[in-house]
Amino acid sequence: MAGIFETTPIFSLLTVVLVGVIAGLWYNRRKVLKKIKTSQEKSDRLELQLAQAQRFEAVGVMAGSIVHNLNNLMSVILGHTRMVAHDLSADAPAQKDLQQVIKAGHMAADLLNEISDFNRQAEQALKPTDLASLLRDTLKFLRDILPSTVKIVEDIPPRAEPVMASTTGVQQVLMNLISNSVQAIGKSPGLIEVRLTSCVI
């Protein structure tokens, strides 16, 4: 009986069909695995691009904060230079040097204003933003770079109603406020409280 089945055309046809099915399944398996691998590679690339974009955004926010601080310092330098020039007589030997300092200070202030204007133009894109999540992420970044003597306490709800805002702009405002607070605290231990509450305007 076994010999009959082995030699019949039907058995041969079934064998060919079975081999074809197995080959097809194996081929499809390779295609599926290849697609999975390709999808994973795309996912890895997207994650890498997202991480790079977040780093660039953080650098941009930090650069804007530096420009803000430099503007503050330039205002102090120009203010004190003008006071010294005012206290000296018009023919004092130092007047010429002081005027050069004031002139250079104005040039530096104009340059900083141009950088600040460029940064603000990049921040104009408004989109629905969860301020609670954004503030927590920004504070986490700030804690890593602030002096150990300064402690940040946050009073932020788990979630907040979305508002139309610029992510970079909000981060810039928060970093400027924290930076000014740290400067006001000085070298002594201090506490900065950040609170987010909802209000209807």
Image: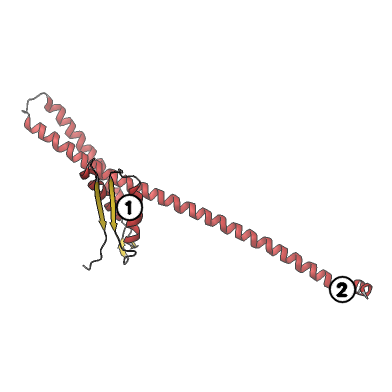
Residue at image location 54% in from the left, 56% down from the top: 42
Given the image, on which type of amino acid does mark 2 rest? Answer: Phe
Q: Position of residue 69 (x, y in %)?
A: 25, 43
Q: Which residue is mark 1?
A: 139
Q: Position of residue 90 (x, y in %)?
A: 6, 28
Q: Which residue is mark 2?
A: 11
Q: Position of residue 125 (x, y in %)?
A: 33, 58
Given the image, on which type of amino acid does mark 1 rest? Answer: Leu
Residue at image location 18% in from the left, 32% down from the top: 101
Query: Position of 32 compared to 136: left or right?
Result: right
Q: How is the image coloured?
A: secondary structure
Quadrant containing the N terminus is bottom right
Q: Which mark is residue 163?
A: none
Residue at image location 37% in from the left, 50% down from the top: 57
128 above or below 186? below
Circle 2: element type: helix
Q: CA distance from mark 2 to mark 1?
A: 73 Å
> Is the C-beta separation of discs 2 and 1 under 8 Å?
no
Residue at image location 28% in from the left, 53% down from the top: 174
30 above or below 18? above
The quarter of the displayed image where residue 16 is located: bottom right
Q: Quick one: 81 or 155, which is closer to the camera?
A: 155
Q: Quick one: 139 or 120, which is closer to the camera?
A: 139
